[in-house]
Image (cartoon, coloured by chain):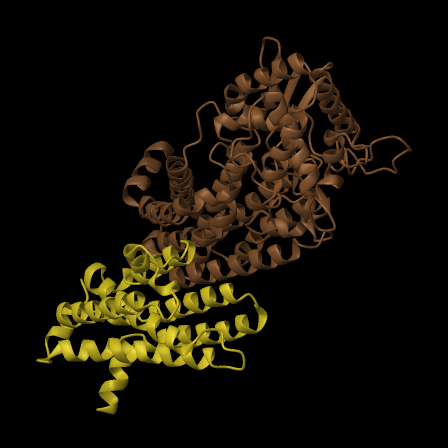
Chain colours: A yellow, B brown
Amino acid sequence: VIRALALYLRSRSAPATLATMLGCAVGLWALGVAVDDPWTRIRLALLATALAIAAIAPGLAGADADLERIPGFAWPPRRAAHLVIAGGVAFGLMAATALTVDPVSATARVARDATGLTGLVGLGAAVLGASRAPLLPLIWTAIAIGVPTTDRPAYKVVVTWMMQPTANGGATLTAVVVGATGLLAYALAGPRR
Amino acid sequence: MTARILRIELRRSSALWGALVVAVVGGLQMAPLVTLFGPAHLWHPLVTGQRTFMIFFSALALGAGAWQARRDRSNRMEELLATTPRSRLSRAVPVALALALAMVAAYAMILAAMVAVNRPPLDAYFPVGAVPVIAIGALLLVALAWLGLGIGRQAPWRLVAPVLVVAGTVGMVVVSDAMFRAAGSPDASGAFLLGPTLPNPVARPIAYAAVGARTNLGQALWLAGLAATGLALFAATTRRARILALVPAVLGAAVAVPILPARLADTYVADRRASALVCTADAPTVCVERVESTALDDWRGPGRQAISVLAAKLPSAPDRVEVYMWVAPDVTAYPEDDPPTEASPGACPSTVCPRGTRPSDTLVFEFGFRGREAPPVPSHLRVWHLLTGAGVGMCVDMVFRAGAYSDGYLAARYAAAAWLMGQPLPSDLISFGGPDVGRLAEELRRTLSSLPADEQRDRVAALRQAELSCAPGDRAALLRGQP
């Protein structure tokens, strides 16, 4: 089983994904030391989280989709597990960084952002294919960091959910809905070819 | 031939998709921000605002370039293409040109979205200096896209495009953060202008500022070098070529830094066309600043009414009205032109009279406050504002007494206007000062109108004379007849 798992991880370029996530964590830590402005720190933490999650994308599809259909696996739970574990690792790394001496971002914020962004990358893989999957989380993040953050009307909260304060229930709800939708879409449909 | 290839690249490559992403994200970001940049009729804050806030979307151009550069690898064409005898450059240029065209279009579309949200009037003053500011923004997008091509070609991995988008945004946010923090000090280095953002104008009102020629030239050279490095990296196949590719960027920076202004504070120069006066063709002349020329029609009637009221009621009246919406009595438009000098005895000191003299033949109405634009003046109050203080602007050192508004001074000025108009003050005229100003002014007006007509005229004329020279003394007492 260990051997099969190791082979699976290699076929899904897990080392590159993990290296990118580690790079994000180290980079965020360094920026957390260098940058004081609280507003900028929130933006930087969000950007680092977004990249760590986007790095999951290449691993969401194997090299040969037909080959992977040959064994009689039940893929949906495995795909779901892949996405959840990868998102969890990214969250763990970013949260650990965020908890260093001077927190760059609150853990609750990182958790919310990681949930929604992981769903987006899964949705991206299901709709656009694994190689284009980073587009969804990155574009949404790019919009959210540049648009002024307000707490009404509702559609603006949905658009800028990543930049909202953690106390904003609408933003958390958006993250959970996006996360669940993406997870279901990827688990059931698989990566688009 | 090249044109045909270019057309095919535009159709088949990801250039247009990349530009679409840049345009949509940039447009969504800028459209809600645009009202913060400045009043709708000012072009210059609009175009510099786009430059400042492009840090949040321009890194997408880096990603778009890196994405496009991976095309050969993802289609497994690299080995096949390496066997062709034609140079890499001949394949690189059409791709790069297509991407550049798409990025210029994206920048223009974002500007168009901003204009659509905050539509400047068609006859508003368009400063020629806005054109290079727009062009350099587009050039920055092209330089980033080409840099993305170069990096994506040399590092053709799937994660490079997302990494570039995030790292590029982080880099630009951090650099602009550092720039804005440094901009507070007058000695901040002009080398910050190699970064993507422009500082805010501090030395003069935003409407009178224009990005200086040295700023534009330095930035254009640096970005051209950066773009050339990107293109050279995209075409490079050998280690030597890769190292040589870095030369243009280094050279660009080395040439740009001495050209850029030495101090960040000198990023902007005065736009003298913007602050020059535009006047009515026929007498009596009414003038406004050119940036506010669309307001000339609003002020023509009230200006002439003020002149005729003054001429009818006072012995000496002005025959010309100048309305300034961007200079306050306490702000000089060009500090570098009017260095404060030691006032000679009897002269109006420059801190009190920025214009040096307060001419009696011109009604100068300065309505800006510390270099900010005046709030809109309701049409029925325009003539009242012009006649406040018997047609003379405030003396700054008299408005404030011990850190508070001097209510008596303000009330005397309003009472003079009420006497000139022959009506009680409109209730919505008084916008600053203490709560008693209106009551005090009405009291003064009643005191005044109980006097013989000649005495009334003499006292208001005396107030006008005192205001013209900013003579010390209690203006309310002057109207009451107490020496």
- Asked where in the image residue B411 lies, by quadrant, the reply is top right
Left or right relative to B347: residue A107:
left
User: Residue B293, position in %: x, y?
Assistant: 54, 23
Say left or right for B59 vs B452.
left
Left or right position of B247 against B458: left
A62, B429: nearer the viewer: B429
Seen as rendered, the residue at the extreme left is A72
Residue B69 against residue A3 in the figure, above or below: above
Q: In this view, does B313 lie above or below B463?
A: above
Q: Which quadrant of the structure image shows residue B161?
A: bottom left
Q: In which quarter of the image is the C terminus of chain A?
A: bottom left
Residue at the extreme top: B282
Q: Position of residue A130 (x, y in %)?
A: 25, 65
Q: Residue at x 58, y 19 (%)?
A: B303
Left or right of residue B428, residue B3 in this image: left
The answer to which of B471 and A69 lies nearer the viewer is B471
> Residue A19 at x, y = what percent?
41, 76
Vertical comparison of B76 with B375: above or below: below
- Visible in this render: residue A108? yes
Q: Nearer the viewer, residue B333 or B189?
A: B333
Q: Judge whether residue B73 can be spotted in this image.
A: no
Give the position of the N terminus of chain A as an image quadrant.
Answer: bottom left
The residue at 67%/29% (across/down) is: B447
